[in-house]
Amino acid sequence: MLKNLYIMDENGRLLYSKDFGREQKYDDNLLIGFFTSITNFSREALGTAVKTVNLGENNKLIFVPKQE
């Protein structure tokens, strides 16, 4: 089940967010900063962008890059 949707540009700026009824509200900009840090780290350390991050308890971050 999709809980939240975030769309950000290649510079990490939040363009759109949608909350699908989660119980706890987080700061969207804080989450986008976290997402950006994860993707930047994976590119630098691994040479490739991370595709998913499992956060436990049925919570997963899925990164989908813009199609060229």
Image (tube, helix red, strand yellow):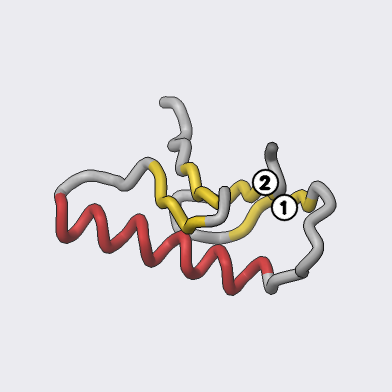
Secondary structure category for the residue under label 2: strand
Give residue 32's quadrant in the image: bottom right
Q: CA separation, marks 2 and 1?
A: 6 Å
31 displayed left or right of 47: right
**Image coords of residue 39 (percent x, y):** 35, 55
Q: Earlier in the sequence, mark 2 or mark 1?
A: 2
- Type of the residue with mark 2: Leu
**Residue at 80% across, 47% down:** 20
**Image coords of residue 14 (percent x, y):** 62, 58
Please tell me whether residue 31 is drawn above or below residue 57 in the rendered image: below
Please tell me whether residue 28 is drawn above or below residue 55 in the rendered image: below
**Residue at 71% across, 47% down:** 3
**Image coords of residue 57 (percent x, y):** 56, 55
Residue at the outermost top position: 68
1 displayed left or right of 43: right
**Image coords of residue 62 (percent x, y):** 48, 43
Please tell me whether residue 23 is drawn above or below residue 27 in the rendered image: above
21 displayed left or right of 31: right
Neighbour tally class for label 2: few under 14, some 14-19, many 20 plus, Cα within 10 Å: few
- Type of the residue with mark 1: Ser
The answer to which of 23 and 18 lies nearer the viewer is 23
**Residue at 43% across, 61% down:** 36
Neighbour tally class for label 1: few under 14, some 14-19, many 20 plus, Cα within 10 Å: few
Residue at the outermost front position: 57
- Residue 17, disc: 1
Give residue 29's quadrant in the image: bottom right
- Marks 2 and 1: CB-CB under 8 Å? yes
The residue labelled by disc 2 is 5
**Residue at 41% across, 26% down:** 68
